[in-house]
Amino acid sequence: MARSSHLVARLIACLALAWQPCSALGQKLEDDTQAWLNLSLEGELDDATAISLDFSRRWREDRRAGEQHTARVTVMREVADGVRIGGGGGIFETEGGGTELRPHQELVLARGRFSGRTRLEERFFDGADRMELRFRQQVRYAQPLGRRTELGVSGEYLGLVQTRERGSAGPRDEWRARVVLSRKVSEALSLGLAYLIIYTPREGAADRVSHIPQAAILYRF
């Protein structure tokens, strides 16, 4: 147990140090704070196919276009030991009236306590010139802290392959790091608390850092 605790501590330290170079160089950053409430429902369609329904409410500052409500469905099929493929789609509604439709496809590889997810998203925005195409790569580690408690640490890179506006000079890359502590309160229900940090480098403007505490509810059916 002591060895596992040291490993988790090192992973968390690495995530924290990922933002250290900006501070060390005295680079000016633009901060904003959000709060997300996530609800997930997971079930099995057959022995090899699973479905998940994800909903969230995101309280955001006015400069980020206000609050947002999201709904997403994903179907994944296990095609080999530790290999799943699938996809789905989501709707993202912003308080200001903007709507985004977001189909996605993904591949998940899992080995022991580590997993990696590769996702491609097609994003359709109201009034945009064209579809935005985004690539996402996530790596996650899960550490049990007892029979019912788990600590998860993940890092993710998001990159725009195609922007929604032709000739756009806006941000194209984004980095995310997340720590979540979850507790299984019954065979079907798990509760969690998480902290997500999003770093967005920008040309011609201060880089943005978003601090996002989260509460998560997971129900398996």
Image (spheres, grey):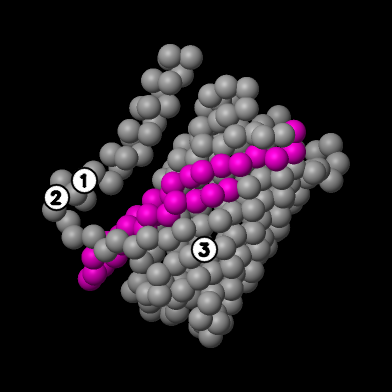
Q: Residue 151 placed where, x, y %?
A: 51, 32
Which kind of residue does numbered mark 3 sit on?
A: Arg
Q: Is residue 170 above or below residue 109?
A: below
Can you tell which mark lies on residue 25?
Answer: 2
Magenta segment's dominant SS is: strand
Can you tell which mark lies on residue 58?
Answer: 3
Is residue 78 found left or right of 9 in the rendered image?
A: right
Q: Relative to the observer, which residue lies in front, 131 or 42?
A: 42
Q: Residue at x 28, y 46 (%)?
A: 19
Which kind of residue does numbered mark 1 sit on?
A: Pro
Q: Quadrant of residue 54?
A: bottom right
Q: Is residue 87 above or below residue 145?
A: below
Instruction: Give the structural element (helix, strand or loop) at label 2.
Output: loop
> How many residues crowd around disc 1 within 10 Å: few (fewer than 14), some, or many (20 or more)?
few
Which kind of residue does numbered mark 2 sit on?
A: Leu
**Which of the two discs, 1 and 3, labels the residue nearer the N terminus?**
1
